[in-house]
Image: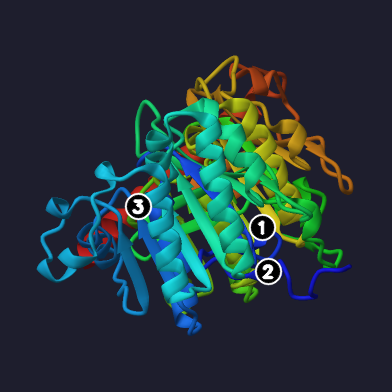
């Protein structure tokens, strides 16, 4: 004896992202348990399931023991939904509803015996013969049962009736009594738990986990989701091994010959590069040079900006001679200004994935990892999350630039997080003092793919862009911040004179520009 071929086939959940987590959707003609504390999003998720069914011409029924029809209509209205085509059957006292037209269908659940409550629900199912049903919530039946054995028998009777009539059901539970969880878990085909977390600062975080789904390979672990106007949006946990993609083996440069030479010809596609150094040393400006060079080649780019406003970024780029605003207008460049207190790691990963798969982004800049770290509640999870994102981007042939600010300005440095082992290339920036000036140095300390220079070069940030000088061969201890000059003192003075002349020329140019204006 075999089951019909379409028995327990997959049907859409109506929730973006949930179908892929469940291996295609809910199992048809089965009962699924949605559990979570009040406010976690169960009702909204259940309504999206029924709305999807109504849009397909299916008969849908919402049985409520806890909320009135008016409250459900209000929830739907706030999301921009209409419940036309969905039957709502209330098992709540009539004084909770202000709709006179619904008075005759209301039943006093508090005055009913448990068996009568379940029989009324079954009678409504028999009258409408729905294909999709939501029962909200089982906690009311649990209170009437006054015992786990009686509660289990009533839920089993309800589930068996739904199965006989080929109905796909969502059973909602507030998990107000933890001791009854296992009773429901063993009765239902699938168990999905929704959680709401409150960090010490920032917006609440919501996540979902599939605890059980019979005879189906589902994506385990926690998946972040948000509730906005329009319903739940779930962000399936990124698994990098599922997203391999062939790409050409080539190097890309930043347009600065000395900088590219320092990197052995440029950065390789499908690699991640960390730009490491104190604040203000030129990390973001150097990363922006690579992004601008990619845009000039006609490649799409994504900038995840944690640390500065978008208008400040545009103004800074303009001051360096990097006009990126036209690329934003044309859609070639996407700049996402991220608020770490309001975004979850899962949503951030989906934004990166959409930029790669939808917009074909070839270079991604995360500025900075310090802000990214603030979006993650625990450091150990940041390492795992970044590992998946970087592996995914590498397998897609995307060049990733990671900016990480170190603590301190001159002398010994420390980093808030250590992600150097995840990066294929590490570019180190330092301030150092020489000839009465605070100067900048840049070097490459690691590159997994191909050779690179071991030299330390001077970096200058000028109005026309970045300039990388010759190797600082006459200095010792540049990376300590207070180097020793071993070269010819006359040569040092010549360099100082040149610097002073450059400064004078720059002042004359600025004065001349002001006069013209």
Mark 1–mark 2 contact, CB under 8 Å?
Answer: yes
Give the camera-side residue of 507 and 147: 147
Image location (x, y in percent) of residue 488: 70, 24
Image location (x, y in percent) of residue 458: 63, 38
Q: Is residue 272 left or right of residue 338?
A: right
Image location (x, y in percent) of residue 204: 38, 38
**Dot 3: what SS?**
helix
User: Can residue 466 be seen in the rendering of this structure?
Assistant: no
The vertical placement of 59 against 322, above or below, is below
The vertical placement of 37 against 126, above or below, is above
Image coloring type? rainbow
Q: Which residue position holds label 2?
A: 10
Mark 3–mark 1 contact, CB under 8 Å?
Answer: no
Based on the displayed image, in which of its 4 quarters is residue 246 positioned?
bottom right
* The N terminus - image quarter: bottom right
Give the camera-side residue of 395 and 38: 38
Q: Which residue position holds label 1?
A: 22
Q: Earlier in the sequence, mark 1 or mark 2?
A: 2
Q: CA distance from mark 1 to mark 2?
A: 9 Å
Image location (x, y in percent) of residue 459: 59, 41
Q: How many marks?
A: 3
Give the camera-side residue of 9 and 124: 124
Based on the displayed image, in which of its 4 quarters is residue 328 positioned?
bottom left
Q: Residue 312 shows which numbered tag?
A: 3
Residue at the extreme bottom of the image, as rendered? 57
């Amino acid at each position: 004896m075999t089951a019909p071929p379409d028995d327990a086939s997959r049907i859409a959940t109506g929730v973006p992202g949930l179908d892929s987590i469940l291996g295609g959707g809910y199992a048809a003609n089965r009962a699924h348990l949605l559990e979570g504390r009040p406010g976690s999003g169960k009702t909204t998720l259940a309504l999206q399931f029924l709305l999807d069914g109504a849009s397909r011409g299916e008969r849908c029924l919402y049985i409520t023991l806890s909320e009135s029809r008016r409250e459900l209509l209000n929830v739907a209205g706030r999301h921009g939904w209409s419940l036309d085509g969905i039957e709502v059957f209330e098992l709540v006292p009539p004084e909770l509803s202000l709709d006179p037209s619904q008075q005759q269908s209301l039943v006093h659940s508090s005055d009913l015996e448990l068996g009568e409550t379940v029989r009324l629900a079954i009678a409504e199912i028999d009258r409408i013969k729905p294909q999709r049903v939501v029962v909200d919530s089982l906690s009311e039946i649990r209170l009437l049962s006054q015992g786990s054995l009686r509660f289990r028998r009533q839920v089993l009777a309800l589930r068996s009736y739904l199965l006989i009539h080929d109905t796909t059901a969502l059973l909602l539970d507030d998990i107000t009594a933890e001791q009854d969880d296992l009773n429901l878990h063993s009765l239902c085909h699938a168990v999905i738990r929704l959680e709401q977390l409150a960090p010490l600062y920032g917006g609440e975080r919501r996540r979902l986990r599939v605890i059980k789904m019979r005879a189906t390979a589902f994506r385990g672990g926690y998946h972040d989701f948000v509730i906005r106007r329009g319903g739940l949006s779930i962000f399936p946990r990124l698994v990098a091994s599922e997203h391999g993609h062939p790409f050409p083996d080539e190097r890309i440069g930043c347009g600065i010959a000395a900088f590219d030479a320092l990197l052995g010809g440029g950065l390789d596609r499908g690699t991640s590069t960390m730009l490491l150094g104190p604040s203000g040393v030129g990390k973001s400006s150097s990363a922006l040079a690579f992004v601008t060079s990619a845009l000039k080649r006609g490649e799409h780019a994504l900038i995840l900006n944690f640390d500065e406003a978008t208008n400040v970024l545009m103004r800074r780029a303009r001051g360096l001679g990097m006009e990126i605003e036209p690329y934003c207008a044309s859609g070639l460049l996407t700049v996402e200004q991220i608020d770490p207190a309001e975004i979850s790691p899962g949503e951030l990963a989906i934004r990166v994935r959409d930029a790669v798969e939808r917009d074909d982004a070839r270079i991604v800049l995360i500025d900075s990892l310090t802000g990214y770290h603030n979006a993650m509640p625990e450091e150990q999870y940041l390492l795992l999350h970044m590992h998946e994102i970087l592996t995914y981007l590498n397998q897609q042939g995307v060049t990733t630039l990671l900016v990480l600010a170190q603590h301190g300005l001159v002398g010994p440095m420390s980093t808030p997080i250590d992600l150097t082992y995840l990066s294929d290339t590490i570019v180190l920036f330092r301030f150092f003092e020489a000839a009465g000036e605070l100067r900048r140095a840049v070097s490459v300390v690691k590159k997994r793919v191909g050779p690179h220079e071991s030299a330390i070069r001077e970096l200058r940030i000028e109005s026309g862009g970045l300039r990388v000088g010759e190797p600082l061969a006459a200095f010792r201890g540049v990376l300590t911040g207070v180097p020793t000059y071993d070269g010819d003192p006359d040569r040092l003075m010549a360099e100082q004179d040149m610097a002073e002349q450059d400064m004078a020329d720059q002042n004359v140019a600025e004065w001349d520009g002001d006069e013209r204006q």
